[in-house]
Image (cartoon, helix red, strand yellow):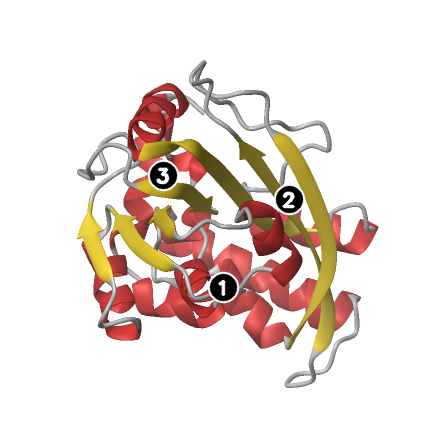
């Protein structure tokens, strides 16, 4: 994604923080184990959004600071975590002091930054033995019906199996981990999930109506799910971790 397209899509998240917070899933414990090395204490969660992943880091007893460019998202995050240090900033310019973090995490957010500039900033903020950790939840599109669902939803964060996130030269080659799991959702909740995605948020009324119509047909008429009844939606969580080249 080039810088112009990235900035254009990111404008979708200037509103709708409360809705995003209500429908987006958390992350598997195994992924957090992979992303946070033993002995780490200070974590900076960049692109923290409404604090979904941030909350999970705090539950580990870590000292966490959050950085988020959307004021709407920050409002929800501060309501959720009123005692957290949460500041307005970007991956390219966090505003944080040098060598002040053991981990810099990006949950569902690295694709919104300039990877070279964000890598330079991460290397500046990390301590010498620190770690950059990236994670995405995505639909498990190895399953045919889920793959079709992702296409109807225009789920742009579904990566190819050989995907490796681009990092700057400040970091070593990243290690990766992957975990499959399921979330129980009703068809109505899946439709609300679609409404939290950048494609839908930036679309006009006609496109939004088409997405909702197609999802309603696919979930209830084609797949046969009943309104109000939950079913298992398969997910794949993919994470990467990389050490600086100090």
* 235 to the left or right of 69: right
Q: Nearer the viewer, mark 3 or mark 1?
A: 1
Q: Nearer the viewer, mark 1 or mark 2?
A: 2
Q: Work out how far the residue at label 1 is from the one at label 2, CA to CA, in angstroms.
A: 16 Å
Among the 4 quarters of the image, the one containing residue 169: top left
Circle 3 crowding by C-alpha within 10 Å: few under 14, some 14–19, many from 20: some
Residue at 62% x, 68% y is: 216
**Residue 1: x percent and y percent?**
45, 25
Kindly indicate whether the residue at mark 2 contacts the one at mark 3 (C-beta within 8 angstroms). Answer: no
**Residue 231: x percent and y percent?**
73, 75
Q: Tell me the residue that label 1 is attached to.
A: 24
* 42 to the left or right of 211: left
| Residue with the most extreme top position | 169
Element type at marker 3? helix
Element type at marker 1? loop
Residue at 74% x, 71% y is: 232
Q: Work out how far the residue at label 3 is from the one at label 1, CA to CA, in angstroms.
A: 18 Å
Q: Nearer the viewer, residue 44 or 74?
A: 44
- The answer to whether residue 152 is above or below residue 168 is below
Q: Tell me the residue that label 2 is attached to.
A: 238
**Residue 91: x percent and y percent?**
31, 35
Q: Nearer the viewer, mark 3 or mark 2?
A: 2
Q: Tell me the residue that label 3 is attached to.
A: 9
Residue at 28% x, 43% y is: 11
Circle 1 crowding by C-alpha within 10 Å: few under 14, some 14–19, many from 20: some
């Amino acid at each position: 994604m080039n810088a112009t397209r990235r900035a254009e899509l990111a404008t979708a998240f200037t509103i709708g923080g409360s809705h995003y917070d209500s429908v987006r899933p958390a992350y598997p414990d195994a992924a957090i184990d992979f992303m946070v090395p033993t002995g780490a204490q200070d974590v900076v969660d960049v692109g923290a959004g409404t604090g979904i992943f941030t909350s999970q880091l705090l539950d580990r007893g870590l000292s966490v600071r959050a950085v988020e460019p959307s004021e709407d998202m920050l409002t929800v995050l501060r309501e959720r975590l009123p005692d957290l240090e949460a500041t307005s900033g970007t991956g390219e310019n966090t505003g944080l002091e040098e060598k002040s973090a053991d981990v810099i995490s990006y949950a569902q957010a690295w694709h919104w930054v300039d990877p070279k500039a964000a890598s330079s900033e991460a290397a500046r903020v990390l301590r010498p033995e620190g770690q950059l950790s990236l994670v995405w939840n995505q639909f498990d599109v190895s399953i045919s019906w889920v793959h079709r669902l992702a296409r109807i939803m225009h789920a742009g964060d579904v990566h190819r199996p050989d995907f490796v996130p681009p990092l700057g030269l400040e970091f070593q080659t990243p290690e990766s981990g992957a975990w499959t799991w399921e979330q129980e959702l009703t068809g109505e909740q899946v439709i609300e999930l679609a409404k939290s995605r950048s494609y839908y948020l930036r679309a006009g009324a006609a496109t939004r109506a088409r997405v909702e119509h197609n999802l309603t047909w696919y979930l209830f008429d084609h797949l046969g799910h009943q309104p109000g009844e939950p079913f298992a939606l398969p997910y794949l969580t993919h994470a990467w971790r990389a050490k600086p080249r100090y």
